């Protein structure tokens, strides 16, 4: 995917005429969950014990968590990194994101977006690290003519 002067690689989320929405951080196209077979990063609320375990086991670095209050942190984790022996809860943004609201003229955010239909000749892209991705939620739909290549064989 090429946008402006940079080159980005993002996952194709939807094609023309697909009706998309993101519900609690998960992408749906035409009312079918798209993300269920993917390993994606989401923000999770975790306690200090879990944070310490993640750092000790080199899953994340100390500076990759964000303190919310004394013993509660935010961390970008994939479902493969979740450990049922510790407290975690998916963090869902509940207020509109100004950038998304301006782009789509709707009070949406990165975790609750749409529904919206992808226009003819346009595509909708999302990053796998959903909370740190400048993708179609922020820059809008991408015209097919802007695509410069396709990544194949990604596992």
Image: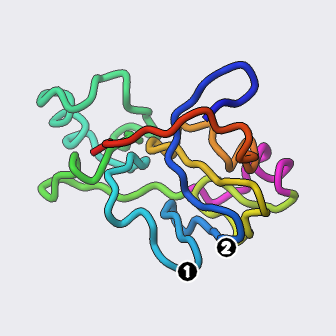
Tag on residue 19?
2
Q: Residue at x 71, y 47 (%)?
A: 144
C-alpha span from label 1 to label 2: 8 Å
Measuring from the top left, give residue 38's x and y in whole percent: 34, 56
Q: Residue at x 87, y 58 (%)?
A: 105
In the rendered view, does 83 fall on the left or right side of 75? left
Q: Residue at x 83, y 49 (%)?
A: 103
Instruction: Locate the C terminus and report the quarter of the image it occupies.
Output: top left
Q: Nearer the viewer, residue 42 or 44?
A: 42
* Neighbour tally class for label 1: few under 14, some 14-19, many 20 plus, Cα within 10 Å: few
Measuring from the top left, give residue 130's x and y in whole percent: 50, 46
Q: Nearer the viewer, residue 66 or 8?
A: 8
Residue denoted by label 1: 31
Measuring from the top left, give residue 24's x and y in whole percent: 52, 65
Q: Residue at x 18, y 53 (%)?
A: 86
* Location of residue 33 (image quadrant): bottom left
What is the span of residues highlighted in magenta in the rendered image? Answer: 93-104
In the rendered view, does 101 fall on the left or right side of 39? right
How was the colour assigned to the protein in this rendering? rainbow
Q: Nearer the viewer, residue 31 or 50?
A: 31
């Amino acid at each position: 995917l090429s946008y402006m002067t940079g080159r980005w690689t993002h996952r194709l989320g939807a094609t023309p005429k697909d009706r998309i929405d993101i519900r609690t951080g998960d992408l749906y196209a035409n009312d079918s969950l798209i993300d269920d077979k993917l390993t994606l990063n989401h923000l999770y609320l975790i306690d200090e014990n879990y944070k310490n375990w993640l750092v000790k086991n080199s899953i994340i670095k100390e500076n990759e968590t964000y303190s919310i209050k004394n013993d509660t942190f935010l961390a970008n984790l994939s479902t493969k990194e979740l450990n049922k022996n510790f407290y975690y809860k998916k963090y869902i943004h509940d207020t509109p994101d100004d950038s998304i609201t301006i782009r789509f003229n709707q009070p949406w955010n990165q975790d609750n977006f749409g529904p919206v239909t992808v226009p003819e000749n346009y595509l909708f892209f999302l990053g796998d690290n959903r909370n740190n991705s400048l993708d179609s939620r922020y820059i809008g739909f991408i015209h097919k003519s802007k695509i410069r290549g396709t990544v194949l064989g990604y596992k």
